[in-house]
Amino acid sequence: MKRPQRPQRPNVVVFFTDQQRWDTTGVHGNPLDLTPNFDRMVSFGTHVYSMFTCQPVCAPARASLQTGLYATNTGVYRNGIALRKDAKTLAHYFKEAGYRTGYIGKWHLASDDPVSEDQRGGYDYWLGANLLEFVSEPYRAILYDNENKPVRLPGYRVDALTDAAIRFINANKDQPFFLFVSYLEPHHQNHVDDYPPPIGYRERYTGRWMPPDLAALGGSSGQHLGGYFGLVKRLDEALGRILDALKSLALDSNTIVMYTSDHGCHFKTRNEEYKRSCHESSIRVPTGFIGPGFNGGGRLQELVSLVDLPPTLLDAVGIPVPEHMDGRSIMPLIRQENVEWPEEVFVQISESQVGRAVRTKRWKYGVVAKGLSGWTHSCSRQYHEEYLYDLESDPYELRNLIGYDSHQKVAAVMRERLLRRMREAGEDEPEIILAEPVKCPQRLVSDDEAYE
């Protein structure tokens, strides 16, 4: 008699966008119908409603997503630093478990283009570029293959990468695979300072709905939002094509698809460029799953960090989660197990400043190291209080409450939360200089409210 075959471990596809705000999606209230495929996916699967990057800069966030470590532990605390060649990535863990691994798109964790084999994070199949925005354009997609030969892909860049992803899925359908598809969009195209969507897509969305923070603060949103929304629309169409391909190959019931982004976009409203800020517009990103273990998971209300996604993917397919990872799997939350989960997320920030922040469901508190360049310093022994926001009454962060005598208890609680999270992330506990006191006629925030 033939032995019954052991079920194959689920395949995994990571659909990774660049610089996408959470409120571009319909499930987060965007009225423009930009993301029907994402919205449908998370309605059947799991929607990580409150998802935040751990570092709102491209390379640091990408290093964290590959390793499950905070930026100060990967060493990639800013752009321009390559991931250590001995760093263990998702590709290594999946490969050890018998998966065929593939990477398509933007890497941003190497020292140059084309990316040498020892800087590709251990991926078997490679069709990538370190800085995709520098070596290609929207209608001129150029990536490098395993032999570092340039490959020009036909079509609009989002579609070209999607075509390559579908080809990989089809070629590896008879074995478990882990595929990481890393789009540049909706990141701006640097050399033209624009968000160039496919022909005809900018006009659909220009002059229409604007997120409230951008309506209040302006920035470059009037110039760029139409193109940005057009890019999000094409990405969602690409997601639909990948989901269709999985269904047509009868892989949909045994494939996990994770959608997320490295950071958001504030359109020059918080500093002189588009990210590198701990405001919601920079740190909150759309995230969802579908597939085995995630179907029917509903809307997850807990606060989740990008650093939690690597252990989640490993846990979801039965690969043991390494103890050294800073993140933790959300699978127990999806299974509604009685587990302790942090009440806050922790964010490190570099380049524009050396800063740190914590966010609870209601409050956000941030500090900055004055006089230090985020380009040359990853951390500091001293920080100054910079902001405190009440996200319940001020979700768009328009009124900074730091120093208010009415909110001293909140600031003290959040300061302790921040110091604890810094210690847990392996940082030395710094000195935090309190903000100058500000008299405020409103009532004192109660102790109970301070812990929300």
Image (cartoon, rainbow, N blue to C red):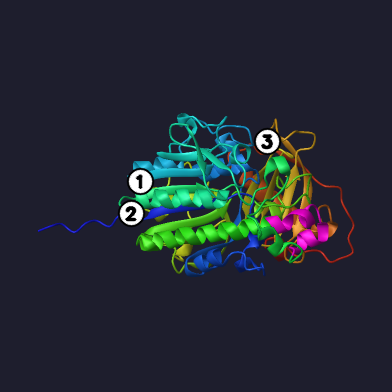
The residue at which mark 1 appears reads as 99
User: Cα distance, mark 1 to mark 2?
Assistant: 9 Å
Which is more foreground, mark 3 or mark 1?
1
Q: State the residue in front, 367 or 14.
A: 14
The residue at which mark 2 appears reads as 9
Question: Are dots 1 and 2 in contact, CB under 8 Å?
Answer: yes
The span picked out in magenta is 210-227
Which of the two labelled residues, at mark 3 and mark 2, occupies the earlier sequence position?
A: 2
Q: State the residue in front, 149 or 314.
A: 149
The residue at which mark 3 appears reads as 379
User: Cα distance, mark 3 to mark 2?
Assistant: 40 Å
User: Circle 3: is it few (<14), some (14-19), or many (20+) Cα within 10 Å?
Assistant: many
Q: Residue at x 45, y 61 (%)?
A: 243
Residue 431 among those drawn in magenta: no
Q: Residue at x 34, y 53 (%)?
A: 173
Which amino acid is tagged 1? Answer: Tyr
User: Circle 2: is it few (<14), some (14-19), or many (20+) Cα within 10 Å?
Assistant: some
Residue 233: give x, y in percent of width and height: 61, 60
Which is more foreground, mark 3 or mark 2?
2
Question: Are dots 3 and 2 in contact, CB under 8 Å?
Answer: no
